[in-house]
Image: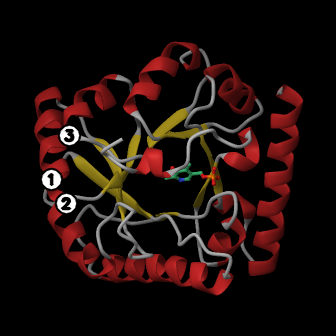
Amino acid sequence: MKENILNNLKAISNRIQLACLKSNRDPRDVKLLLATKTVRAEDIKIAIEAGFHLIGENKVQEVKEKFEILSTVEHQKHFIGHLQTNKIKDILKYDVNCIQSLDRIDLAEKLHQRLSKENKTIDVFIQVNTSNEESKFGISPEDAVEFTKQVAQFDTLKIKGLMTIGLFSAEDEKVRVCFKLLKKIQMQINELHIPDVKVNELSMGMSNDLEIAIEEGATIIRVGTAIFGQRIYPDSYYWNESK
Ligand SMILES: *Cc1c(COP(=O)(O)O)cnc(C)c1O
C-alpha cells in the first residue's frame, strides 16, 4: 500500500508538471490537496510524510476519527464537504484551517456567531455550483458575487478563494466551461476591491480533470482516487446531506 501511494503521488506530480508546462505556469503555484475521505489515517500519514501537507475531508466524523493519529504530523486541513450547521463546533474544535464549501448565508451567520464567541477567525472559500447540477452543492454562479459581498461583512470569515466541482463528463470542453466560469467569477469579485477580500485561490480539478483545471488557472487541485485508489461509496454519498 505504501509503495502504491508513493508511486501515485509521483505520477500526480508528473501530471501537474506537464499541465503547467503546457499552460506556461509555475508548478509551485499549484498545490495538491489530498482528498482523504474514507482513507485510513495511517495511509494519509504516508502521503503527508512524503511532503504533501494539505488534506481535505468531507465529513466531520472522519475529521474527528483521524485527529489523533494525524496530530503527530504537521499538515493543513481543509473541509471540502457539505457542512451542516450543527457540526460547526467540531470543525473548530478539530483545528480545520479552511472551509472550502461555504455555500449559504445561514451557515456563514452561524459560523460567525460561534467564531466570535471563541474569539477566532477562519479562512473560507465560496463554493460555486458551476455545472448547475441539482445534485451538487454550491451557490449558483449568478449569485456568487452578491453572496461574497454578504459573507465579507462577517469579519471572522476570511475569504481566500473559490471552490467548484466540475461537471462529470467525458467531454473535456464541457468540463472546461465550468472552470472558466469560476475564473471569471474570481476576476469579477477581485475587481470590486471589497475590503479584506482577496480571492487568490481557485480550488478546482480532481483525479479525472486536473489538467483542464490547471490550464484554466487552478491553484489547488483536490485529488483522492488517483492517489489512494477507488472508494467503496459513490461520491453522491459524500455530497448529499440526507445520507
Ligand atoms: C472526493 C472529492 C474530491 C476528489 O475526487 P477524486 O475523483 O477521488 O480525485 C475532490 N473534491 C471533493 C469536494 C471531493 O468530495
Numbered marks: total: 3
**51 to 225, vertically: above or below:** above
Viewer-side residue, 105 vs 155: 105
**168 to 237, vertically: above or below:** below
Which comes sooner in the sequence, label 1 or label 3?
3
Find disc 1 in the rendering and name its residue.
154
Disc 1, SS: loop
Residue 34 in which image quadrant: top right
Per the rendering, the mark at residue 85 is 3
In this figure, which colouring scheme has been used for the structure?
A: secondary structure
Mark 1: amino acid: Phe
Find disc 2 in the rendering and name its residue.
151
Per the rendering, the mark at residue 162 is none
Q: Quadrant of the C terminus?
A: top left
Q: Residue at x 58, y 63 (%)?
A: 219
Percent x, y of residue 6: 84, 36
Say whether residue 23 is left or right of residue 6.
Answer: left
Mark 3: amino acid: Thr
Say whether residue 29 is left or right of residue 226.
Answer: left
Distance (Cα) linking label 1 and label 3: 16 Å
Residue 98 in which image quadrant: top left
Distance (Cα) linking label 3 and label 2: 16 Å
Q: Nearer the viewer, mark 1 or mark 3?
A: 3
Q: Residue at x 39, y 66 (%)?
A: 199
Verify CB contact (< 8 Å) between mark 1 and mark 3: no
